[in-house]
Image (cartoon, rainbow, N blue to C red):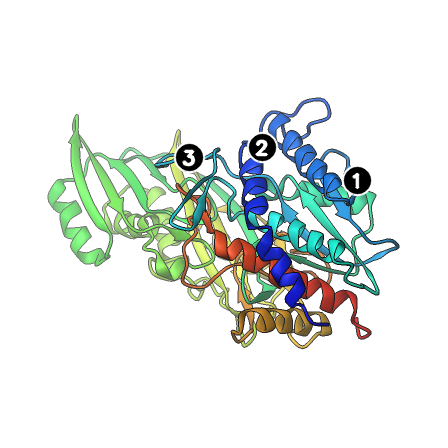
Amino acid sequence: MNMKNVFDYIDSMREEMTKTLGELILHPSFRQEPEEGAPYGRPARECLDFALEICEKLGFKTENVGNRAGVASFTDGEPLLGILAHLDVVPAGDGWTLDPYKATIRDGKLYGRGAMDDKGPAVSVIYATKALKDLGVPLKHGFELILGTDEECGSSDIGYFREHRKMPKWLFTPDASYPLINIEKGHIGSRFTATCESEKLISLHGGKTINAVPAAACAVVQGISESEILKSIEAADCTVEFSLTEEGGKIRIDARGVSAHASTPDVGDNALTALIKLLSLLPLDEPAKTLLSGLAREFPYKDTDGSSAGIAANDDISGSLTLVLSILDYEKDMFSGAIDIRFPVCETSESVCKKLDAALKRAGFDARSNGSEPHCVPSDSPFVRTLISAYESVTGKKGECIAIGGGTYVHGIPGGVAFGCEIEGEDNRIHGADEFIRVDALIENAKIFAEAIVRVCNSEEL
């Protein structure tokens, strides 16, 4: 059908859409202490209630699923298509120049926590659906919007939803990037430990989160001269910045690198593995020297694909395995650390875990590794082709499938893909200060989703 009337109608709701998004942003819906009837905290529950109330006022049928998720629809029967968005956010954090929980529009951008991740996309879906309903656009098959409230902290909401309610046959989440993400690498998280008494190594700390390249690391040593350390810094030949501070007969070594997400470690500069390399060159006592040398051998500085540990893998559709030694602490005679791996579809979690645990054992550590399998929907599937065609029709841009190292809201859900809403080259400051969505993008997203709903729900092939 000709979608011009639908698109014109969406344009006419511009003010209403920004108002609704602003009202959702008022709710600080990051996970907080659970309460009776509010498993993720009162603000998340109130945000869910408010969103369902909006949908009811717009004429949709709604359902609250265990106070963890909600469903809104205007069609009858079993839905063929589901769109999965989330209303929870990460905490505001520091650095904001505007109130994170009060929407502000400046220069065509709407600022506020959740504006792009993922309240803005949810609003676009709501008003795309309203346009189709109000204009009586015929749909041969049903559709529903699913609104979750725990995506940022593990997606237990969707686990609960799938236990208590059937998912639609086809599903996409507007919680990633355009054009379309059909492959998400598998993920391994490993924790490892070793006991170690040392008189020369007093402490070591690097990294705080497992899914990030550590930008800072520090160690305190004694019984080693500054000249020995400087000589080893030169021998280490690292691009991170080292600095030394004397502290009461001890020397503190600081390393400064560049942080990056664990799915793209090559764009960072790992301060921790640089420091490990440096420490392995110092005249430490045993077994500290052997353990650090083992880590430096198996997971060396600048090795981000697991080659040295015998874990490397690569395929044409999902790319290379990535590995980050992201956390290592030494105190009270104990090493404890963590490694993050994203692996391609040609590998399995069991195989990678086995190789990783063997590498850590060779380095002298006990390991506990586990993970999830890759998520893949064929690029030539009718569902993927239909969504790509909707994107191309509305934007005039060429659509293509993307493989990523991170995971999205649909990871592990059969047939699920990520469709929108970030645009390549535009930094919406997701999870950062002054997060925003362009108001024009809020409107265009609604048009893309309306087109996608019509094409999928009227498809005989699907």
Gap between marks 1 and 2 measured at Cα:
21 Å
Q: Residue 449's x, y, as percent?
A: 64, 60
**Mark number for residue 93?**
3
Mark 1 vs mark 2: give the one in front: 1
Q: What label does residue 31 carry, if any?
A: 2
Q: Quadrant of residue 305?
A: bottom left
Quickly name the residue at label 1.
63
The correct choice, above or below, for 268 with respect to 46 in the image is: below
- For the N terminus, give its image quadrant: bottom right
Q: Residue at x 62, y 45 (%)?
A: 86
Q: Residue at x 74, y 53 (%)?
A: 134
Q: Secondary structure at mark 2?
A: loop
State which quarter of the image contains the C terminus: bottom right
Task: Give whichever of 182, 342 is nearer the camera.
Answer: 182
Mark 1 or mark 3: whose residue is earlier in sequence: 1
Q: Are marks 3 and 2 in contact (CB under 8 Å)?
A: no
Taking 169 as reference, is 384 above or below it? below
Q: Amino acid at mark 3?
A: Gly
Three-letter amino acid code at the position of disc 1: Glu
Q: Residues within 10 Å of mark 2 (few under 14, many from 20)?
A: many
Residue 418 visible in the current orientation: no
Q: Amino acid at mark 2?
A: Arg
